[in-house]
Image (cartoon, helix red, strand yellow):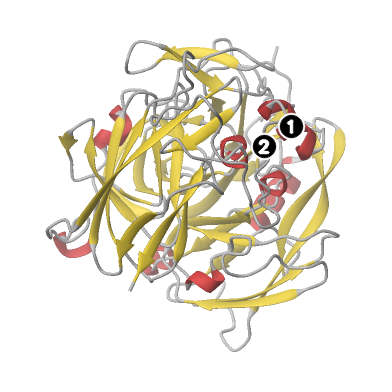
Amino acid sequence: MKNELTRRGFLAASAAMAAATAFPRITFAQDRPLSLTATTRVIDVGGRAATVMGLVNGSGRQGLVLDPGQRFRVDLTNALDEETIIHWHGQIPPNVQDGVPNLPMPLLQPGEMRSYDYETLAGTFWMHSHVPVQEMSLLAAPLIVRRPEDLTSDRQEVVMFLHDFSFRPAADVLAEITNGAAPHDMGGAMQGSGAMAGMDHSGMMSGESGHMNMNGMTMGGMGAGGMQMDLNDFDFDAYLSNDRTLSDPEVIAVERRGRVLLRVINAAAATTFWIDTGGIPARLVAVDGHAVEPMAGTRFGLAMAQRLDLEIDLPESGAFPILALREGARERTGLILATTGVEIRRIDDLGETESSAFDIDLAQEASLRAARPEGMRGLAPRPVDRSHQIMLGGAMQPYLWTINGETWGNHTPITAKSGERVHLTFHNMSMMGHPMHLHGHVFQVVTINGRAIDGAIRDTVYVPPMTMVTIALDAGEAARWMLHCHHMPHLASGMMTEFSVTA
């Protein structure tokens, strides 16, 4: 039975949301850098206090919001008692500012401050530690760069920032997930132990199907080849939207018949979500910060590190839950959009049925089309100068995930020259999906399972089991850029390589 939400009053909840996620239209001073601090903070999870990490701005809130055309001029201070480094996910800073341990800059020492200054891309982005156990400890926050139309449109902006959360130390969680097989130290020189014996070039373990059960891993969904997929390899204690569970959700005050731009960011370490608007029609207008031709729907999938911008036209009045459903499971989180004076009722954090696997046939990805002003769509057509096929492999036992049969530290770089048009084809031969993220570049999805499309512009593409996805990009700054799976336990166990661009 649903009960009236009384833990926090509607007005208090609305005020908190206005401060945190329904961003005010503020013009920031351009004459001095913004302040950002990596620190610890305390949040309430199901009535229990939890100490987590965070990225706090000069106003004491999580994340940053920049005006149209505003440069990323930020002084980052490490107030933690350990080393850290922050990656500006989806942005294209100079390589020296990209935020990967020792490539090329070392981690920030406790108490150290480092300055950043680069031209921004507009859209919905985020920032996070590039040390897996720290990202799993919630060292992440929204990074929103507004477009001019965001300041003039008659719509309310709301951010939905998703996490998976455990009360246990992240290092213990990572050790359990990987069965202790995570030797790739992202906090130091990231030296790996190399690929294990018995690994073939595809990345599959000899004699293994790669879909074993371990440590509470959830089985579910059929892959493109008709085989059973591995969907979740850990059951977290809670799933959070803006640091809160459905037992005490964010309630955002909205106008009757108003329009909302909902910026959804999947900052989870190891969880894919379905975003469910509860029957209220929505329009998907951007992915990973880049505009797409509007696509109508009420349910949209979101892999780790990806973002969705949804326009929602609200009915006359009411309370409208926006839910994030854990892939292949019953757990869910979310927030509530509510007009003034309506009753807010509790929502159980377990759904009645398990949600389905995400985009196993890539139907959602295949439906997306890049949109650009004045009729320009996607990348400008030009001949392909260089192509690479990238094999994604691995298995649950032993816990090992590879790129081209290799792990970080024993990897062979993927090469290109600056200015070349490059095609990268990801071929996933494992039974888990992999959200593949390329640093320092944006790319366009151009082929799905051999079928050419004029797909979305992205920085992170999801590759389900037994599928192939080709992306096109123009090689940028001559430097070593990371290419990796954004499932943190996969990354920590070696699923990372480099995109090496030469002049």
Crowd around label 1: few <14 · some 14–19 · many ≥20 (10 Å): some
Residue appearing at x 66%, y 46% in the figure: 132
Give the percent coordinates (x, y) of residue 56: 72, 62
Q: Is residue 184 above or below residue 417?
A: above
Give the percent coordinates (x, y) of residue 52: 79, 47
Labels 2, 1: front one: 2
Badge 1 is on which residue?
A: 175
Residue appearing at x 43%, y 68% in the figure: 479
The tag earlier along the polypeptide, 2 or 1, is 1
Closer to the camera, 245 or 71?
71
Task: Describe residue 155's horizontal placement relative to residue 387 as left or right.
Answer: right
Asked whether the viewer can see residue 328, the reply is yes
Image marks 2 and 1: residues in contact by CB distance under 8 Å: yes
Instruction: Please tell me in which quadrant of the rendered image residue 300 appears.
Output: top left
Closer to the camera, 199 or 459?
199
Amino acid at pointer 2:
Ala
Give the percent coordinates (x, y) of residue 491: 57, 41
Badge 2 is on which residue?
A: 182
Q: What's the distance in space between the residues labelled 2 and 1, CA to CA? A: 7 Å
Amino acid at pointer 1:
Ala
Instruction: Please tell me in which quadrant of the rendered image residue 23 appears.
Output: bottom right
Asked whether the viewer can see residue 91, the reply is no
Residue appearing at x 58%, y 10% in the figure: 352
Farthest-out residue, front: 197
Residue appearing at x 76%, y 38% in the figure: 170
Give the percent coordinates (x, y) of residue 414: 37, 53
